[in-house]
Amino acid sequence: EFIPVMILCITPTPAIDHTLTVPRFKSGEVMRATHTRLTAGGKGVNVARAIRTLGGQAFCLGFLGGHSGELLAKLAEQEGLHGEWTWIKGDTRTCIIVVSGDTEEATVINEEGPAVTGADWDAFNTAVFRAPDTKLVCFSGSLPVGSPIEKWKEMLLFLRSAGRDVW
């Protein structure tokens, strides 16, 4: 019998993925999208989605800010991607994905996320430390601008000393 294991999915720079399907996309021209979709994104959120799709359980942790952060949290929850978010100043980034309807090639434009402070990282580390007790922790995606590497190291050392498998 398959027993799903909880995996913590830590994604420091989640994003709203805004996908537009454009027939015969051509850069440098005015085009009209025939389909548009907004989803919660970022590498760790995408890992959580894959885990859930395969029948496992995931718990997301990351920084969110502004109206776009509120939207991401809502979209993730609607999709069954549960988590705890650390709220910061600034807006959660949006990534634009343009899919050419004729070739299905995708052009991806990723915004840079908001900067975070040492105090933001302290709050984030606290959220990670009190997250559901699980042996598996997945870090995915890039670090936000201004991330003090010592806070990142502190989190990793804590998780390893708690006997968690980190990748």
Image: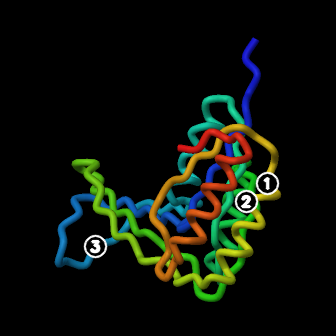
**Looking at the image, is mark 2 or mark 3 earlier in the sequence?**
3
Judging depth in this view, the residue of 49 and 38 nearest the camera is 49
Q: How crowded is mark 1: few (under 14 residues within 10 Å), some or many (20 or more)?
A: some
Place residue 53 in its image quadrant.
top right
Along the line of sight, the residue nearer the viewer: 98 or 155: 155
Q: Where is residue 163 in the image (x, y as percent from the top left)?
A: 70, 40
Q: Which residue is drawn at 18% across and 72% down?
A: 27
Quadrant hosting residue 117: bottom right
Q: Which amino acid does label 1 sit on?
A: Ala
Going by the image, does 111 lie left or right of 39?
A: left
Q: Nearer the viewer, residue 157 or 147?
A: 157
Report how far apart the C-alphas of labels 2 and 3 lie in the structure.
Answer: 43 Å
| In contact (CB < 8 Å): disc 2 and disc 3 | no
Residue at label 1?
A: 131
Most extreme residue toward the top, as rendered? 1
Q: Is mark 1 on a helix, strand or loop?
A: loop
Q: Would you name the residue on which mark 2 appears?
A: 128
Q: What element carries label 3?
A: loop
Q: Within the image, what quadrant is residue 23 found in?
A: bottom left
Residue 166 in the image, given as x and y percentages of width and height:
58, 44
Could you tell me if the residues under marks 1 and 2 are in contact, i.e. CB atoms within 8 Å?
A: yes
Residue 79 in the image, given as x and y percentages of width and height: 69, 50
Q: Percent from the top left, x then y, of residue 39?
A: 57, 59
Q: Where, quadrant-wise, is the N terminus in this rendering?
A: top right
Residue pictured at 74% horizontal, 74% vertical: 123
Compared with 51, 100 (above or below) is below
